[in-house]
Amino acid sequence: MKPIEIAKFIDHTALTAEKTEKDIIGLCNEALEHHFFSVCINPCHIPLAKEILADSDVKICTVIGFPLGANSTAVKAFETKEAINAGAQEVDMVINVGWIKSEKWQAVKEDIAQVLNACNGVPLKVILETCLLTKEEIVKACKICKDLNVAFVKTSTGFNKGGATIEDIALMRKTVGTLGVKASGGIRDTETALAMIKAGATRIGASAGIAIINGLKDTSRTY
C-alpha cells in the first residue's frame, strides 16, 4: 500500500491537554501536506482548524465525552451539537463503560442514540475502550452500535491502559458487518497500521501518522 493510500485511513490526532494553538496549526498543516483523512482534535480547537482547513478535503473530527465517557447523556448531546455548529464533520464519542459494567445496556443504547440524534447526519464513531471490556461486552456494545446504524465503532481513547489490538479489531469487524471500524491507541508504525487494516479497520486514529506513512516508528507518542 502506497503512503498516499495509507494516509487516507488516518485521523491525524492531537488530543492531549497541553496542545497549544501552534500545535493545532502544525497538525492541520501536516494533514494538508500528507493528505490525511482528517484531524482529530478537542472541541475547543475546531474554529482554528476550520480556518486552516477551509477549501481542503481534510475533515475535522472531534471527541465527545472524552476521555471517560461518564458525562450525562444530555451533556454529551449538547457538546455534540456545539461541536458540529463550530465545524466538526465527524464525531467520536466515548461509550459509558461504567454502565456497561453495571449491565445497564438500555442506558448505554439511549446514550449513544441521543448523541447520534444530535449528530443530525454527521458521522458518529463510538469509542468502546476495549481494554476495559470483556470479549462478550465488546460484542454486545458492537451489536447496539450496529442496531443504531452509527458510522463506526472505535477501539480506544488512547488514554487508558491499552489501545487497539488485532484480536479486538477482528472481533469488532465480525460483529458489525459493514459498519466502519476505527483502530486507535498505540499505533505508531506502518507494520502495525497495515495489520489493523488487514484485520478489518477502515480508519486509523494516530498521532504518529507521519511515521506511519513513511515506514518509520514513532516511540515518542502515547496515542
Image (cartoon, rainbow, N blue to C red):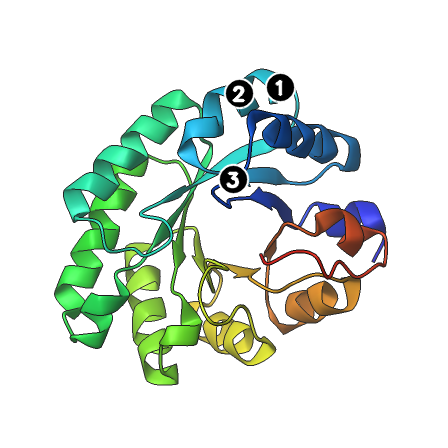
* Element carrying mark 3: loop
Position of residue 209 in the picture relative to residue 53 (left or right) = right
Mark pair 3, 1: CA separation: 20 Å
Could you say where residue 206 lies in the image, as x and y percent from the top left? 62, 53
Q: Residue at x 60, y 38 (%)?
A: 38
Residue denoted by label 1: 52
How many discs appear?
3
Q: What's the residue type where badge 3 is placed?
A: Glu
Circle number at residue 48:
2
Position of residue 119 in the picture relative to residue 47 (left or right) = left
Q: Residue at x 77, y 55 (%)?
A: 212
Image position of 99 with respect to 29: above or below: below
Q: Are marks 1 and 2 in contact (CB under 8 Å)?
A: yes
Q: Are marks 3 and 2 in contact (CB under 8 Å)?
A: no
Q: What's the residue type where badge 2 is placed?
A: Leu
Which quarter of the rendered picture does the C terminus lie within? Answer: bottom right
Residue denoted by label 3: 18
Q: Around disc 1, counting alpha carbons within 10 Å, would you say few (fewer than 14), some (14 to 19), or many (20 or more)?
A: some
Position of residue 60 in the picture relative to residue 80 (left or right) = right
Circle number at residue 75:
none
Looking at the picture, tell me which residue is in the foreground, 177 or 14. Answer: 14
Q: Quadrant of residue 201?
A: bottom right
Could you say where residue 222 lies in the image, as x and y percent from the top left? 59, 58
Mark pair 1, 2: CA separation: 7 Å
Mark pair 3, 2: CA separation: 16 Å
Could you say where residue 153 lies in the image, as x and y percent from the top left? 43, 60
Which quarter of the rendered picture does the N terminus lie within? Answer: bottom right
Q: What's the residue type where badge 1 is placed?
A: Ile
Q: Residue at x 53, y 20 (%)?
A: 48
Query: Closer to us: mark 3 or mark 2?
Result: 3
Image position of 33 with respect to 53: above or below: below
Looking at the picture, tell me which residue is in the foreground, 159 or 124. Answer: 159
